[in-house]
Amino acid sequence: MIVPIELVQTQNITYDITIDTLPKLNFDTSVVVVTNPTVAKYHLDTLLSKLSAAQLHVVSVPDGEAYKTLQTVEEILNECFEHKLDRKSLLIAFGGGVIGDMTGFSASLYQRGIDFIQIPTTLLSQVDASVGGKTGVNNAYGKNLIGAFYQPKAVYIDPAFLKTLPRREFAAGVAEVVKMAVMFDKAFFHYLEGADLTDIDTIKEMIAKSVSLKAWVVNQDEKEAGIRAVLNYGHTFGHVVENETNYTTYLHGEAVAIGMVMANALAVELGLLTQEEADAVKALLLSVNLPTEYAIKDIDDFYEHFFLDKKSAKGSIKFILPNSLGNYKMVSDIDEYIVKKVLHKFGEEACS
C-alpha cells in the first residue's frame, strides 16, 4: 500500500509512504544509517541486506527519550563530518520516534539540509512519528521545543519489524492510533474496541488507517497552522507528564494516554464529551495496559508548564479536546479555575 504526502499548498513537496515488506534500496551516494543498539541487534542485518550505496556507514546512538538532546544530534553531525558527507548524501532513520526525530533534525542542519528517509521500527513511529516531517529534540524546558519541519524523501513501513517489539512499546503505539480515532473517525474507534490487536492483519489495517488519516491532515496543514494541531490531542498534558518525570518513567505513548484521559476530563467539564465517552476511551487504553492515572504533585507548577507548549500564544493556552467521539474542538482562554479544577482530580490526594 502506498499513501502519498502532497504538500502542494506550501512547498510543492511530494513523497510516498510505503506500507509493505521493505524493498531493495539502492543509492549512488554516501549513506549514513542512524540507529540504536536495540534496533541494531534485531534488525540491522535485515536492513543492510536490502541496502546498497556508494559508501555506507552506521551510527548507533543511545536508546531512549532521555538521549533525545542537542548533544546526541551533535554526535550524529560529527559522524557525518567524519565520513565527509556532502549535500547529495543521505541519512536513514532506522528506529523509533526518537531516532526519526533526531535523524531528521540532523539532516535539516547538516550543510543547511540534506535528504533523509524514514524506516520506522516501532508501532508509534509507524503510525505517527515518521509521517509529516516533524523533527527535533527535548530540553530542560520541555519536549520537542527545539526542531524543524523537515520532510523526508520517503517513508518505508514494514510491519515485520514489529515482531520483536516489546508489548509495552506496542501499547505506546496504540495510544497514538486511539488519538487519531477519537479526533477524526468514530467508526475507527469502535472498530478498535472490538479488534484483536495481536492479529497481524488487524495491525496492518490499523497502521494503514492511521497513516492515511495523518497524511490527510498533513497534506492540508504541514506546519500546524490549523488542523494539524489537532494531532496534539493528549500531548499538551502528556508533555508535562514527561517533563516532570525527566523522560525516564513513561514512554511517549504512555504519557499521551495519560494526557488523553486528562484532556477528556476537561472536555467532560466543558460539556464537550459525555462521561460515558470518556470512560470508553479510558477502557480502550486500559485494554492494552496503557497507564491512565498520574498523581500531580504541584497543581500550580503543572499548570504553568502549559505556557511552554508550542501551541500556546500570547499568554493563552490552546487545548485540543474531543467534541464527542470522532470530532474535535480547539479551545483557548479556558478559565484558570476550571483547568485547575480538573487537574485537582489528578492531584496526589485524589490519586491516593
Image: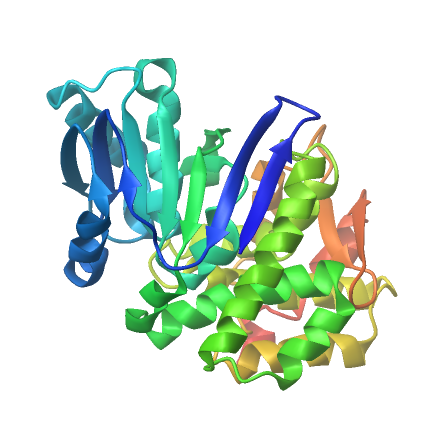
| Vertical side of 122 occupied by 100: above or below | above
Q: Residue furthest left?
A: 82
| Vertical side of 206 occupied by 303: above or below | above
Q: Residue furthest right?
A: 271
Q: Looking at the image, which residue is at 69% across and 72% down? A: 189
Give coordinates of residue 254: x percent, y percent.
47, 66
Camera-side residue of 125 and 215:
215
Q: Is residue 341 visible?
A: no
Give coordinates of residue 280: x percent, y percent.
70, 80
Camera-side residue of 98 and 123:
123
Q: Is residue 276 visible?
A: yes
**Residue 306, located in which quarter of the rendered image?**
top right
| Vertical side of 33 occupied by 166: above or below | below
| Vertical side of 146 occupied by 255: above or below | below
Camera-side residue of 31 and 300:
31
Give coordinates of residue 146: x percent, y percent.
44, 30
**Residue 32, located in which quarter of the rendered image?**
top left
- 11 relative to 279 in the view: left or right: left
**Residue 31, located in which quarter of the rendered image?**
top left
Q: Looking at the image, which residue is at 45% across and 77% down? A: 200
Q: Looking at the image, which residue is at 47% across and 50% down? A: 18
